[in-house]
Image (spheres, rainbow, N blue to C red):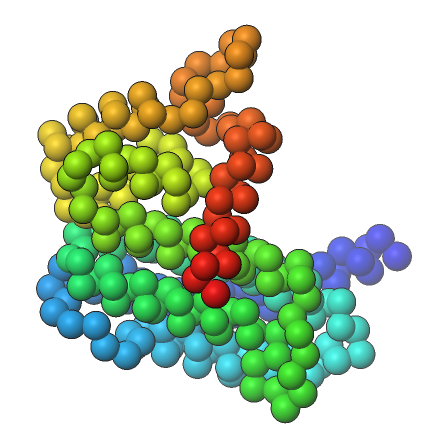
Amino acid sequence: MDTFSTVISSSIQLLVQDLDAACDPALTAMSKMQWQNVEHVGDQSPYVTSVILHIKQNVPIIRDNLASTRKYFTQFCVKFANSFIPKFITHLFKCKPISMVGAEQLLLDTHSLKMVLLDLPSISSQVVRKAPASYTKIVVKGMTRAEMILKVVMAPHEPLVVFVDNYIKLLTDCNTETFQKILDMKGLKRSEQSSMLELLRQRLPAPPSGAESSGSLSLTAPTPEQESSRIRKLEKLIKKRL
């Protein structure tokens, strides 16, 4: 029985890898676009249409074949979201430099993908079923993070204090590594970034009293209380958007 369960799990993972790989060329195309030269916001970009096409071609077949074992289809959806969304954000950071209009177009594209992913369990189905809450939570959290990254990119970087505080407010993982990636997306020189990074270190929440961890450790491993507080802030932002 354990071996059989392992085979099922491996099979689901293969289905995820197949769809994931089909979406890779579209994400590569996204990261290679000249986002600083975008002059106006239009419909969703061709790479988004390509991702949606692959999802519509693959997911209904998988769903139909797993109709009698719905839990495995849910597992497929969850595993795909957990694989695709981090990869999308990784490619998002490669889109640099970005103009204000380019960031607006990327935000529109990101929202389009978010809506498609939320609809993924019942996409192209005549019977509309509410997506499992566990799946919806993953998509909302992951894609909202992508939207917040772009909102920080779009924000003016002066005055510095306002920009840094905005970053801390919008992103749950407010560490120096993510911040530097955002500054790179904005096209700022390293000489300009140093003072901004120093200001971020000063304004990040302090570690709990009595903690012996260094500043760098507190950035990568926030306390449960800090994490909970940031998640609540993010949930409020999500509700405002919806």
Above or below residue 99? Residue 193 is above
Residue 6 lies left or right of residue 100; in this view the side is right
When asked about the image quadrant of residue 179, the answer is top left
Taking the spot 52% from the left edge, 51% from the top edge, the residue there is 235
Residue 126 in sight in this render: yes
Residue 80, position as x, y percentages in the image: 56, 62
Above or below residue 7? Residue 122 is below
When asked about the image quadrant of residue 219, the answer is top left
Task: Judge by depth and name the residue closer to the eye, 178 or 169.
Answer: 169
Residue 151, position as x, y percentages in the image: 31, 53
Residue 32 in sight in this render: no
Quadrant in the picture for the N terminus? bottom right
Task: Judge by depth and name the residue closer to the eye, 6 or 235.
Answer: 235
Taking the spot 80% from the left edge, 58% from the top edge, the residue there is 5
Residue 109 lies left or right of residue 228; in this view the side is left
Above or below residue 36? Residue 179 is above
Taking the spot 11% from the left edge, 30% from the top edge, the residue there is 191
Above or below residue 140? Residue 116 is below
Residue 156 lies left or right of residue 110; in this view the side is left
Taking the spot 51% from the left edge, 82% from the top edge, the residue there is 56
Task: Report the number of discs.
Answer: 0
Residue 145, position as x, y percentages in the image: 43, 51
Residue 156, position as x, y percentages in the image: 18, 46
When asked about the image quadrant of residue 58, the answer is bottom right
